[in-house]
Amino acid sequence: MFFPISNSHISPVYLVVIGFFIGILGGFFGVGGSFIAGPALRAVGLDWNFAVGTDLAHIVGKSVVAAKRHRALGNVDLKLGLIMAIGTMGGAEVGAQLIQMLKRAGNVNFVVSVVSIAIYASISSFMIWEAWRTLHYQKKRRPRSKVPGTAAKQDESSFSHRTQAIQRLKIWPMISLPASGVKAISLWVILLVSFIGGLFSGFLGGGAGYIRMPMLVYVLGIPTHLAVGTDLFEIIISASYGTFSHAVKGNVDILIALVMHTGAAIGAQIGAISTQYFAGPKIRMAFVPLPLIGAAIVIYTLVTGHKL
Amino acid sequence: MGMARVAPTKKEKTKTLQAFLVELAIYGVFVTGYFFLVLHYLAGWLQDLHLHHVKLYASMTIVLIIGQAVFLESVTTWLLRLLRGRAE
């Protein structure tokens, strides 16, 4: 199928399948899936700037579907999501400007590839360490539930002492997040976390859930299920802003995004419903291979210069 | 945070899987029709917007993707209700 806006030929079946797969991941982990979608679009010949912008557009649609489902499951903290949207938009604009600078310098593909590999590898390493430690301590502390057919929304983290120290920082104004069980936290910490997420969103594409979801859990102390749902809600706002910003700069092929989203719409619902059957540390442990897959695809494309 | 949920029985799982597969088939027909009708007619107009009216194009990207999301979510929910209603 020919897509005239980006002047590219891509199989619609490929786009739908990629969208479906990323939709499941998005609904389950609260991520945009850009670590897969970006390299997957790049692998069929789309330039990074188009891959980044188009992926953002498809993420808006998918997040609407997944966040609606998570809201029905009680997994969305609206107050936190709205506050985070402000910081994310600021960060996304700075990230998009960085992409423009690199486009003008003519080395956007190389720099974004190297940065994405470093980020993906770091996130995976940290999460595998933390989730393994949490599961290990849980196993030592108490026997597993013997009640057949039950799965709990239990959430513990071996990083919680650091999270509590962050929550004790008294930098005015302090706010409470009752839906997430956080009694008090500095507004500036939330804005900083969301700004960093937005920066990666604008720079590497996607909703940056791969960095924001872990930060919601480890820095702000939000339970994993709520982090997933709230992240998706926040992504709708921030990714819409990022899409508009990239579209004005000529980096969005909306036709590709629409085709991808037809698969993602159904995948996102399946992923969201599946979160009910897993506890927090297990969701985090399952998250680990995803950024590594993205890094492997980027390395392959960068080293060989071949399409996958 | 200790909300326990009862896992679905094997019969319920089979029913859900069957409903999902039927939904996927119907959804596939919808999507194929959508490709050939909607995207075919939109492509030229959107390309023109992209080249000559970039801010309008940027606004349309948001409207189209959210519009499609709401539409497809309604379609999948409706299909699920219809199929589950028939199965019960």
Image (cartoon, rainbow, N blue to C red):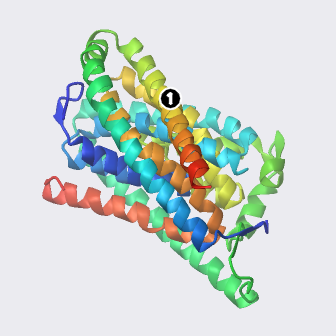
Question: What residue is shown at x 22% (from left), y 50% (from top)?
Answer: A43
Q: Secondary structure at mark 1?
A: helix
Q: In the rendered image of this protein, does residue A48 appear above or below residue A140? A: above
Answer with the quarter of the image where residue A192 lies. Answer: top right
Q: Position of residue B15 (x, y in %)?
A: 54, 62
Q: In the rendered image of this protein, does residue B46 appear above or below residue B83? A: above
Badge 1: chain ID: B
The reply to whether residue A126 is in sight is no
Question: What residue is shown at x 14% (from left), y 59% (from top)?
Answer: A304
Q: Position of residue A243 (x, y in %)?
A: 44, 29
Q: Position of residue A279 (x, y in %)?
A: 65, 69
| In front of the other: A83 or B79 | B79
Answer with the quarter of the image where residue A2 lies. Answer: top left
| In front of the other: A173 or A76 | A76
Q: Position of residue B2 (x, y in %)?
A: 79, 69
The reply to whether residue B13 is in sight is yes
Quadrant housing the N terminus of chain B: bottom right
Answer with the quarter of the image where residue A58 lies. Answer: top left
Mark 1: few, some, or many residues within 10 Å (few <14, many ≥20)? many
Q: Which residue is mark 1?
A: B66
Quadrant housing the C terminus of chain B: bottom right
Q: Is residue A147 left or right of residue A234?
A: right
